[in-house]
Image (spheres, rainbow, N blue to C red):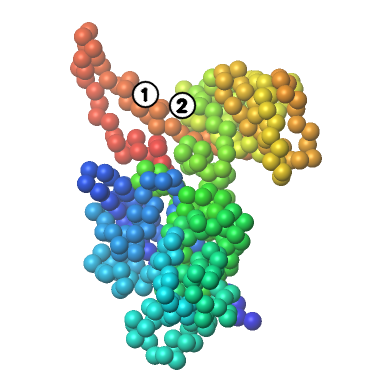
Amino acid sequence: MEKEPEPSGTNSVIEIKNVDKFYGDNHIVKNLTLSIREREFLSILGPSGCGKTTLLRMLAGFEHHTKGEILINGESIDDKEPFKRNINTVFQNYALFPHMTIYSNIAYGLKMKRVKKDEIEKRVIEVLAMVRLEGFENRYPSQLSGGQKQRVAIARAIVNNPQVLLLDEPLGALDMKLRKQMQIELKRLQRKLGITFVYVTHDQEEALTMSDRIAVMNRGVLEQCAPPSDIYEKPGTKFIADFIGESNLFESVVEDGSDSTDGNAHLFSEGGTLLGKLEQFEENELLYVCVRPEKTLYSLASVDGFSLCGIVRENIYLGNVIKTIVVLTNGQEVKINLSPGQVPPAIETVLYIYWNVKDCVMVRTISHRIFTELEKVKLNEYGEVMEAEPINKEEVKSQEAP
């Protein structure tokens, strides 16, 4: 039995260097730098309007970047037409030719390249087997289900043996059950082919399920690129902590984390005191403490280091989890995920919220940097600026995203 390729390599297939994209005055992609590895399944994840599809179109050659450079195998593709890039794209609407059979749809690109008839037949039959559509070659797109059309679109792309396959939300039109099934199929196919997949999606669960790495974008900025486990468990920014899954976020001020005697950072928040990890934070620095609902604990009595007190407002049964909603004294909602075997606390019960320090993540906030810079500004008696040190924009940006 032929051994499948390793999940991803270490060599870079695509290098995106300091790329900017403007549409008029709109800055869509902002100074983006990213390496995409061979045999990697990379998902580009973010909300609508974050620039992810624009980035994909620049890789495909359908859009041209305003500044920066894009390299494939070390060679610039800035002046290369789409059909010369050894990159194929699968679109959300599949774009199949309705008047052609499945065989003709898949063979079309090879015919345009003047591949010999025998070679075309061999390769079409091979890819039909890969996407598990043997025997469908004489059908038309109108005779297929949504999942089958999606597999035909992929077959049409991979029959050309591209080095990179770009996928622009190809599962978006499918129902939930079929989408989950196709996620597994796509990952299996990518491993079997051993080529690089670059997958654009706004679905966090989809990205976590399939990816070797996830590149999270927000307002044109690449905020973090890391394996799914790191994106979920070690979010680099407040946006990622809030966007990926669910999080309880506590805006806090460091009390004495630099010289803590118990090995923890002591913090204040509007809801009360709490503990975090002892890291290199300044005294009085503003930051966010992120705790996932499944890591959030409760007690009927106060816990040392914590004074987050609230009242149970709701218990929601979701099948595989029971979600308890606790409202703190400052009005903040805290979510606690319990397994179905656990008995949730009764409505109106007064609870104390806490967590194991190792289970929280502390994320710097740009607010602290802004306040620090504003403190340097000196005003005269009329409120006019007399003296101010220039703000280091790169340093401020580093507080927003790693």
Q: Amino acid at mark 1?
A: Phe
Q: Is residue 226 above or below residue 364?
A: below
User: Which residue is located at x 57 percent, y 62 percent?
Assistant: 182
Q: Is residue 157 above or below residue 330?
A: below
Locate residue 108: give its quadrant. bottom left
Q: Which residue position holds label 2?
A: 286
User: Which residue is located at x 79 percent, y 40 percent?
Assistant: 341
Report x, y in % for residue 128: 53, 78
Q: Nearer the viewer, residue 210 or 94?
A: 94
Q: Which residue position holds label 1?
A: 371
Q: Judge left or right: residue 182 versus residue 76.
A: right
Q: Judge left or right: residue 318 versus residue 389.
A: right
CA–CA distance between discs 1 and 2?
Answer: 9 Å
Q: Nearer the viewer, residue 151 or 393?
A: 151
Tag 1 near tag 2, CB within 8 Å: yes
Q: In what element is the residue under mark 2? A: strand
Neighbour tally class for label 1: few under 14, some 14-19, many 20 plus, Cα within 10 Å? few
Report x, y in % for residue 133: 57, 76
User: Which residue is located at x 41 percent, y 46 percent?
Assistant: 48
Do we see residue 296 in this rendering? no
Q: Nearer the viewer, residue 24 or 270?
A: 24
Q: Judge left or right: residue 263 versus residue 280.
A: right
